[in-house]
């Protein structure tokens, strides 16, 4: 099993920045990628960013140029840096982890609210 713990959410004003952290623990040796998703109220879950252990990253078009993803392997933590936040970025953000064998793990989610 893998446990994921998200932190860093909160309420900010438009134009501000936030950095979300996702710390992973447990049986992590079979992980090969992690990502961030978000779900706004009344909307479906959207893919935001992913990072593979190879270093390859993916950023969704909707946030490209404003968001970035990184990983600190020494701290077992993946970060989502969010800059120039907009009210439409308001959502619950979820961290997930991919394990060989097609298993996925999900964090509990963390609220990000961006006020105009």
Image (cartoon, helix red, strand yellow):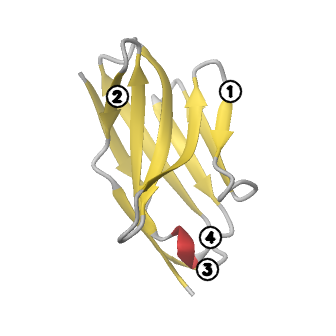
User: Which quadrant: the N terminus?
Assistant: top left
Residue under numbered circle 2? 104
Of tags 1 and 3, which is closer to the observer? 1
Q: Position of residue 76 (x, y in %)?
A: 45, 28
Q: For the residues carrying marks 4 and 2, which lies nearer the camera in this image?
A: 2
Q: Is residue 38 left or right of residue 49?
A: left
Residue at 61% x, 38% y: name it.
Answer: 70
Q: Determine crowd level at label 1: few under 14, some 14-19, many 20+ residues with C-alpha closer than 10 A.
A: few
Q: Give the labeled residue for mark 3.
A: 14
The reply to whether the C-beta atoms of the residues labelled 4 and 3 are less than 8 Å apart is yes
Query: In the image, residue 55 lies at what x, y percent?
Result: 67, 24
Image disc number at residue 56? 1
Q: As drawn, which residue projects farthest toward the right?
A: 65
Q: Residue 115 at x, y = what percent?
A: 51, 84
Query: Do the residues bearing badges 2 and 3 touch, measured as CB atoms within 8 Å?
Result: no
C-alpha span from label 1 to label 4: 24 Å
Q: Give whichever of discs 1 and 4 has the lower sequence position.
A: 1
Residue count near mark 2 (Cα–Cα under 10 Å), binned few <14, some 14–19, many ≥20: some
């Amino acid at each position: 099993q893998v446990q994921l713990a998200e932190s860093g959410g909160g309420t900010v004003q438009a134009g501000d920045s936030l950095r979300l952290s996702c710390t992973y623990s447990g049986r992590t040796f079979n992980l090969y990628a992690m990502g961030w998703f978000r779900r706004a109220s009344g909307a479906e879950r959207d893919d935001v960013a992913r990072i593979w252990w190879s270093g390859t990253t993916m950023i969704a078009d909707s946030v490209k140029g404003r968001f970035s993803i990184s990983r600190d392997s020494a701290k077992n933590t993946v970060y989502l840096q969010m800059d120039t936040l907009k009210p439409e970025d308001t959502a619950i953000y979820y961290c997930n982890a991919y394990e060989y064998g097609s298993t996925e793990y999900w964090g509990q989610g963390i609220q990000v609210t961006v006020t105009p």
